[in-house]
Image: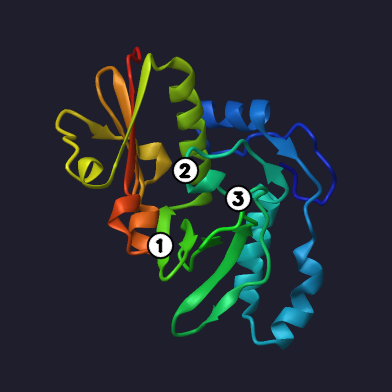
């Protein structure tokens, strides 16, 4: 992605991503015209939004704005297009800004939190990954696992909560907070806890087990 508002139909994977995620962005992503949120800077400052928070949203827009990626396997597919907008919050609670519109009607929105985490804002703010990079890494890993796994098993609720992760190691590049990926000898496990936590709905906990993978 470039730092202007021009159209780049074939996006470039931002620096700092894994090779897998960069390739995922470049092969499966579509670059659309990003909105120029800097033109709202004076108006937003006039409404009491700190300049530093506007700069943070603009930096997100420079890196991710206008990028459309394939649907995620959970959260009804995630944001339709990554796209920042006006920050919201307070000095006491911290400031957040939208990460992009939902694909379908949802009980929550996708938000970048005060510390830069990517998450959902439902009854409570629930960070999923420590950054948007982690979210994109998780999408790339899911696409890789779906392509190469011999079997995919989906479990929910209490069965997912008691899943035995002995012998598995966390996948660091997804920067998991509430959600996480775990790597075993020949399998990957994705744990989606965000809705269970954010909506206070334990039955929404879900795990996807991708088995039959090589090294």
**Residue 184 in the figure: left or right of residue 81:** left
Q: Quadrant of residue 31?
A: top right
Please identify the quadrant where the C terminus is shown: top left
Residue 132 spot, x, y in % from top left: 52, 49
Residue 184 spot, x, y in % from top left: 25, 24
Mark 1 residue element = strand
Residue found at x 73% / y 36%: 30
Can you identify the residue that label 2 sits on? 74
Residue found at x 60% / y 72%: 53
Can you identify the residue that label 3 sits on? 79
Q: Earlier in the sequence, mark 1 or mark 3?
A: 3
Name the front one of labels 1 and 2.
2
Residue found at x 62% / y 39%: 14
Q: Which mark is residue 126?
A: 1
Q: CA distance from mark 1 to mark 3?
A: 15 Å
**Residue 151 in the figure: left or right of residue 93:** left
Assess disc 3: are there few (<14), some (14-19) or many (≥20) residues with their C-alpha within 10 Å of its C-alpha. many
State how many labels appear: 3
132 versus 183 height, above or below: below
């Amino acid at each position: 992605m470039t730092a202007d508002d021009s159209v780049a139909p074939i996006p470039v994977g931002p620096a700092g991503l894994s090779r897998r995620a960069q390739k995922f962005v470049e092969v499966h992503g579509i670059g659309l015209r990003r909105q120029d949120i800097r033109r709202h800077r004076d108006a937003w400052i006039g409404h009491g939004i700190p300049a530093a928070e506007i700069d943070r949203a603009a930096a997100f827009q420079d890196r991710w704005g206008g990028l459309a990626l394939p649907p995620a396997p959970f959260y009804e597919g995630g944001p339709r297009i990554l796209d920042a907008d006006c920050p919201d919050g307070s000095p006491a609670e911290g400031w957040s800004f939208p990460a992009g519109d939902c694909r379908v009607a949802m009980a929550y929105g996708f938000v970048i939190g005060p510390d830069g985490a990517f998450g959902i804002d439902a009854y409570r703010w629930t960070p999923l990954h420590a950054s948007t990079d982690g979210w994109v890494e998780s999408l790339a890993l899911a696409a890789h696992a779906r392509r190469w796994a011999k079997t995919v098993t989906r479990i929910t609720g209490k069965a997912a909560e008691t899943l035995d992760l002995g012998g598995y190691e966390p996948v660091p590049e997804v920067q998991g907070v509430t959600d996480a990926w775990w790597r075993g000898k020949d399998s990957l496990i994705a744990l989606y806890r965000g809705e269970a936590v954010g909506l206070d709905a334990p039955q929404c906990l879900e795990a996807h087990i991708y088995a039959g993978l090589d090294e």
